[in-house]
Amino acid sequence: MNGIADVPVVLEIRGLDVGYYKDLNILQDLNIKARKNQITAILGANGVGKSTALKAVFGFLRPNAGEVLLDGESIIDVPTYNRILKGLAYIPQKPGVFKDMSVEENLELGGWTFRRDKKQVRDKIEANYERFPVLREKRKQITGELSGGQQRMVEIGRTLMADPKVLLIDEPTAGLSKMLAQEVYEMLAALTSRDNLTILIVDQEIRQALKISDYVYVLELGRNKFEGVASEFDDLEKAFWVG
């Protein structure tokens, strides 16, 4: 079995300094690598800069220093809409579904850039129904009537309409019950193996993140604290809370 170093790096954050003001960096010299077809988790307490890191990667925040590389190419000067075209997708913590629209209408919105190609839109929707069979059953249902886990499923399905290669997901199970959260985690784990996706998540659910992740980074005060293969961090939760 190949080691982690043998897996190609798809997304890299290198020496990143980021803040909402030029003279105040929330993240300092941040270094993260997300490897192909793996789930990489960024863990840490509230306020350490986990969500800020994703916003910087997606282009919502301009770093004060450092680089963001996608397939080895710097995207630091690439506008957000072009990062989407390059295969980067971002799913925020707060639900982004249109609750007054049906499941299928929500999915159709994910194909907006190729909306004139009706066959492609239909094929992508069908792929989502195969990926998430429950959505086929509920395709005409108003999305706001679905469970929180199913709404998250719609949101992820809509994002996948554009065929991203890297998903950035902020707190994937925020606000969900334990049972629904488990459903979402299982869904994310399946996406790497079935759809060949690379996923970078930020999470406070340490136990669950460790179960589905391949590699983990823990932040403290906006900096890298420690990192490693998730399966080797049996005492990570204890070390995290104590440290």
Image (tube, rainbow, N blue to C red):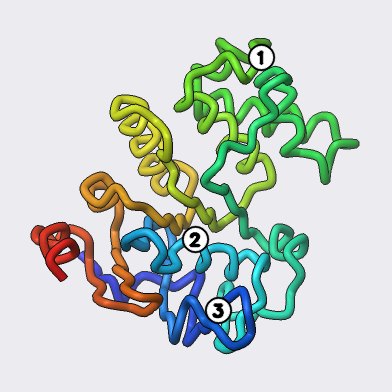
Quarter where residue 83 is shown: bottom right
From the viewer's perspective, is residue 98 above or below residue 81? Answer: above
Residue indicated by mark 2: 51
Q: Are marks 3 and 1 in contact (CB under 8 Å)?
A: no
Q: In terms of secondary structure, where does tag 2 sit? A: helix
Which of the 4 image quarters holds residue 223?
A: bottom left
Q: Determine crowd level at label 2: few under 14, some 14-19, many 20+ residues with C-alpha closer than 10 A.
A: many
Residue 131 to residue 50: above or below: above
Name the amino acid type tagged 1: Ile
**Which residue does the image show at 47% across and 57% down from the upper left?**
198
Q: Residue at x 44, y 43 (%)?
A: 172
Q: Distance between the residues labelled 2 and 1?
A: 30 Å
Query: Which residue, given by chain and number where applicable, does mark 1 sit on?
Result: 142
Give me the C-alpha separation between circle 2 and circle 3.
11 Å
Disc number at residue 18? 3
SS type, badge 3: strand
